[in-house]
Amino acid sequence: MARKLPRKFYSRNDTVEVARDLLGKLLVIPSAEGRRVSGVIVETEAYLGVEDRGAHSYGGRRTARNEIMYGRAGHVYVFFVYGMYYQFNVVTGAVGTPHAILIRGLEPVEGVDAMRQRRGAKARKDRDLTSGPGKLAIAMDIDRSMNGADLLGKDVWIENYREIPAESITSGPRIGIDYAGDDALKPWRFWIEGNIYVSRG
DNA sequence: GGAATGATTCTCT
DNA sequence: GAGAATCATTCCG
């Protein structure tokens, strides 16, 4: 079984590089019964803190909600949007540097039946299970109680799993942040070309 | 197949 | 009191 990624994987200076490197890694969140539920990360978005108008921490904004972004790399940042959905992020960068990476798409690997159960009738096809940040949060049973969890702990972690050739990795503008002006156009979204669990494209 | 729209509640001003 | 790092449904062609 693969080892958990070490703290230094997340604490590198270049958050955009970490976002790209997360593609092909395995996100594991054991179920309440202790069974492994996991999926390959196929889509990510980098949020670069103070200088990024799309980030919650733009301009150094520091609130109860985004406090975890300022903490140590390798922790989980979960927030709630649109009155219905949770978003799962990985904190990166040094302490005091509010960078994070949003996980936007997963390819289910283990515990697929549990994911189907959590998603219910809305997931008509398996690709509906985890092809988007709100959907994968439901399938992986992610909610606010996971905010601040350590990725080197036992509730949630990320393992090496699959090597993705550089030519299969594509980048483009991020999604759902039109209010961010020019920063919305920055190519800080990464995905595995052709994978059906990518949220769009 | 694609575009428009309503859902629903937390968070910050 | 407004707006949000989204999704599912509905309508149209």
Image (cartoon, coloured by chain):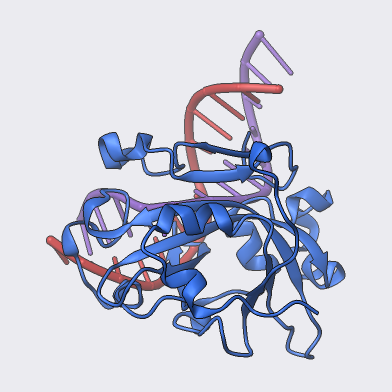
Chain colours: A blue, B red, C purple
Question: Residue pushed farthest right?
Answer: A113
Residue A158 versus residue A161 in the image, above or below: below
Q: Position of residue A163 (x, y in %)?
A: 72, 55
Residue found 33% across the figure and 79% down from its top = A71
Q: Is residue A32 left or right of residue C7?
A: right
Residue A78 seen in the current view: no
Q: Nearer the viewer, residue A103 or A121?
A: A103
Q: Quadrant of the C terminus of chain A?
A: top right
Q: Nearer the viewer, residue A147 or A99?
A: A99
Q: Position of residue A167 (x, y in %)?
A: 66, 36
Q: Position of residue A95 (x, y in %)?
A: 30, 77
Query: Which of the 4 quarters of the picture holds residue A155?
Result: bottom right
Q: Quadrant of the N terminus of chain A?
A: bottom right
Q: Nearer the viewer, residue B8 or A112?
A: A112
Q: Nearer the viewer, residue A81 or A159?
A: A159
Q: Is residue A109 left or right of residue A63?
A: right
Q: Position of residue A29 (x, y in %)?
A: 68, 78
Residue found 81% across the figure and 69% down from its top = A117
Residue found 42% across the figure and 72% down from its top = A11
Query: Which of the 4 quarters of the picture holds residue A3?
Result: bottom right
Q: How many marks?
A: 0
Q: Is residue A112 left or right of residue A178?
A: right
Residue A111 versus residue A146 in the image, above or below: above
Q: Is residue A15 left or right of residue A32?
A: left
Residue A179 seen in the current view: yes
Residue found 41% across the figure and 66% down from its top = A12
